Image (cartoon, grey):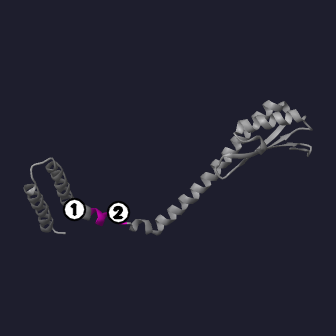
Amino acid sequence: MDWLSWLRGILVVALFGWLLEALQPASTMRRYTRLVIGLLLMVAVLEPLTVVLKQRLPALTGSYWHDPDVQGLLQQGSVLQTQEQAQTVSQYRKEMSETGEAAAQAAAGSEALSVSVTIGQSEAPTGAEVTLRGHPAAATRTAVRRAVATALGISEAAVRVDSSEGGLAP
């Protein structure tokens, strides 16, 4: 684009704006007409700048995203994101297990051995398995089930209480 055609474009927009304003009756719409004509003039004045930017910056034209080096970086980023999500879920599961274990210890005393938490698709706890020493009383199992369910924010039916000696408690 040469500067003569650029200047011609600006003059055409300016003359068109002058003609439109001259033909319009005096009203409140004149203010909006001037605004639109001013915006069109700004676009006409800045048009050479967009041409220069498109020539100098390949990222604006979209060819940048098809570069093999960029594709490799995008794949590495995707792999790192997947690894980070897996690590975050693992850390979350560990923290939730510790929370459940603390609740089980509080409810059963030293009888609680471990708590394993199941994480669902929504990355929220969906279940828990508690292992207790020996054969605890039914009241202790119920108290542990209730405490762990409350601590993890799940239903009591989703908490399974096991005995370290193999006895399952429903």
Q: Position of residue 68 (x, y in %)?
A: 47, 69
Q: Nearer the viewer, residue 107 or 35?
A: 35
In the image, residue 54 lies in the stretch drawn in magenta: yes
Q: Which residues are magenta?
A: 52-61
Q: Secondary structure at mark 2?
A: helix
Which one is nearer the viewer's eye here, 18 or 65?
18
Residue at the spot of label 2: 60
**Does 111 appear above or below 124?**
above
| Residue 74 counted in the magenta span | no
Residue 6 is left or right of residue 163, and the answer is left
Q: Position of residue 6 (x, y in %)?
A: 15, 65
What residue is at 92 percent from the left and 43 percent from the top? 165
- For numbered disc 1, what is the local secondary structure? helix
Give the amino acid at mark 1: Glu
42 over 128 or under it: above or below: below
Q: Residues within 10 Å of mark 2 (few under 14, many from 20)?
A: few
Left or right of 8? Residue 144 is right
**Type of amino acid under label 2:** Leu
Please report the residue visible at 12 percent of the width from the left and 67 percent of the height from the top: 4
The quadrant in which the C terminus is found is top right
Q: Are marks 1 and 2 in contact (CB under 8 Å)?
A: no
Residue sitting at x 78%, y 30%:
106
Residue that badge 1 annotates: 47
Left or right of residue 75, residue 24 in this image: left
